[in-house]
Image (tube, rainbow, N blue to C red):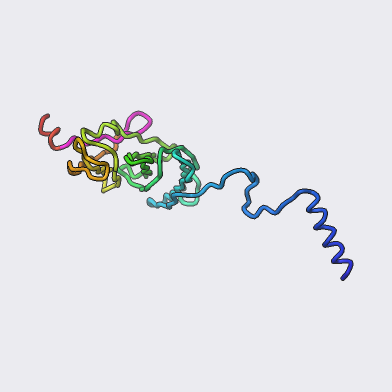
Amino acid sequence: MKLLISVFLLSIGLWMESGLRPNLFHNNQADTAPTFIAFEKSLRFNIYTFQVTAADSGAVRDLSVKAYRGSLLLTNFHIRVDGTVVGAEVADLDNNRFPELYVYSASDGSGSFGRVYGWQFLPERKADIQAANWLEAGEGYMGHDSLWVERNILCRKFPIYNAGDANALPTGGAKMMRYRLQPAGQSFILIPEPSAGEAASR
């Protein structure tokens, strides 16, 4: 018994002399700030599964996407997004039976300007989806976007500000914009539908 205690104490002494310390948080870089997951969501479209996570690491966040077809990992990619990730959805806006993934973000600050990031997952590749003229939302637009998918349309709604309105008190009502997905070369593009007034003037 005394021999076992002596060996144990000797081991502790050698461990302390070597400068080693226990790593309780599994972080090999002690001076690196921990990364917190601010958004995490799992989505399914038929046999496809998507895992979306975003780290809270400042004004520009790291977005991670894993896409599976059944148990097969199709892709695992990372991009930098502006602002906070606030939502994610899967859809098939162009009715081609291949899934699209849409991730929504809101910029930091009083405006909370919305943005959409999108990809379509084809049999042989991942295609980017861009939003046409996204910042050209019309007079009175000052952010505060709400974004969602409804059937085969990407919907965008935001308040309208009149001159002199406070940020928290818009007085111009709300505007709804609807976007349809169309092919654009090797990628895809979200095209806004004309409003009722624009359609009548054509």
| Residue at 44 percent of width and 51 percent of height | 40
Whether residue 189 is in magenta: the answer is yes
- Quarter of the picture holding the N terminus: bottom right
| Magenta part, dominant SS | strand
Is 144 left, or right, of 62 in this rendering?
left
In this view, the residue farthest toward the left is: 200
Residue furthest right as drawn:
3
Q: Position of residue 21 (x, y in %)?
A: 72, 52
Q: Is residue 34 above or below residue 162?
A: below
Instruction: Give the residues in magenta.
Output: 183-195
Q: Tell me if I can see residue 77 in this picture.
A: yes
Residue 65 pos. (x, y %): 46, 44
Q: Nearer the viewer, residue 187 or 130?
A: 130
Residue occupying image coordinates x 45% and y 38% = 60
**Does 26 appear above or below 181?**
below
Image location of residue 179, percent across then percent down: 26, 39
The image shows residue 111, relative to residue 50, as above or below, that is above
